[in-house]
Amino acid sequence: MAKGIQDYTSQESLAPYIKAVVATGSAQDPCRAVHMTGTSASVNLTVNDAVVAFWLIKGHTYPICVTKSSSTDVVLLY
């Protein structure tokens, strides 16, 4: 299950992203945001155990808590 706002310590919630991990296509720890490094594309992201298609633009960061991405061009930010 995805982390809620109350699941972060005050240091985590106030700090900028402290860790970046390239999406593997497999389930990973819930992240705080995603960043698209590859070409703009429609990417399937798993949000709250539901697969949702998002159009992600290259170079943009989106505040979406996901656990899985269909593309390895997505970086999960923690």
Image (cartoon, grey):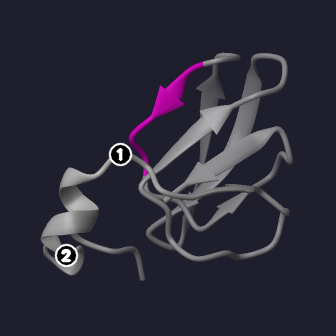
> In the image, what residue occupies the spot 86% across and 47% down?
72
Q: Position of residue 29 (x, y in %)?
A: 57, 76
Report how far apart the C-alphas of labels 2 and 1 lie in the structure.
13 Å
Going by the numbered disc 1, the residue's amino acid type is Pro
Magenta segment, which residues?
Answer: 60-64
Q: Vertical placement of 5 versus 23: above or below?
A: below
> In the image, what residue occupies the spot 62% across and 53% down?
76
In the image, is residue 61 part of the stretch drawn in magenta?
Answer: yes
> In the image, what residue occupies the spot 56% across and 58% down?
19
> In the image, what residue occupies the spot 81% across and 72% down?
26
In the image, is residue 44 part of the stretch drawn in magenta?
Answer: no
Q: Which mark is residue 9?
A: 2
**Quadrant containing the N terminus in the rendered view:** bottom left
Going by the numbered disc 2, the residue's amino acid type is Thr
Q: Vertical placement of 9 versus 15: above or below?
A: below
Q: Position of residue 65 (x, y in %)?
A: 43, 57
Query: Label 1 belongs to which residue?
Result: 16
